[in-house]
Amino acid sequence: MKLPATATVLGLLPLALAESILVTFPSGTPDSVVDQAKQSVKDAGGKITHEYSKHHAASPSHFYILGGGNANTLLSLALLKGFAADTKDDSVQQLSTEFAAYNPTVEKDMTVTIQ
C-alpha cells in the first residue's frame, strides 16, 4: 500500500518544482516564434497559463493587473507579445538561449505592488 502513495507524491513533484514565469517578445517578433516558444515550454513539461498579445489590447483589466493602470504601461503592453507559464527552472535558460535572436525577456512571475 505504500507504493501507490509514494508514486502519487513523486507524480506531484514536478508541479512542486515548477515556477511561474513571464515570457515577452518585442512587438515585431513573428507569431510563429512565440508559438514555438510556447511549444518548447510544453515539450519540457510546462503549462501555458496565459497569453499576451495585441488581441488582448481591448481588455483594460489585463493592463491594470499587469501594469498598474499607467497610460504609458498600457501602450507598452499592447505592443508586446508573450505568455505566462508554469515550468521547471531549467526551461528558463533553454528559452533564453533557444530564442536569443528574438531578444525574449524571461522573468519570474510575481506580485508587484505600489505604495
Image: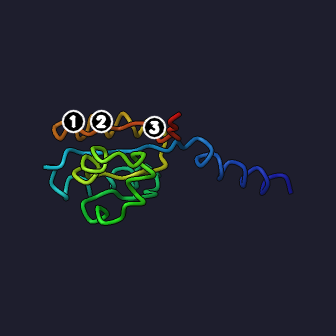
| Residue located at (52% from left, 38% from top) | 113
Q: Quadrant of the N terminus?
A: bottom right
- Check disc 2 and report its element: helix, strand or loop: helix
The three-letter amino acid code for the residue at tag 3 is Lys
Disc 2 vs disc 3: which is toward the camera?
3
Camera-side residue of 79 and 48: 79
Where 9 sits versus 111, above or below? below
Report which residue position mark 2 lands on.
Answer: 96
Mark 1 and mark 2 in contact? Answer it, CB < 8 Å: yes
Q: Earlier in the sequence, mark 3 or mark 1?
A: 1
Report which residue position mark 3 lands on.
Answer: 108
Tell me the tag on residue 100: 1
The three-letter amino acid code for the residue at tag 2 is Ser
Distance of label 3 from label 1 (alpha carbons): 18 Å
- Check disc 3 and report its element: helix, strand or loop: strand
| Residue located at (31% from left, 63% from top) | 56
Q: Earlier in the sequence, mark 2 or mark 3?
A: 2
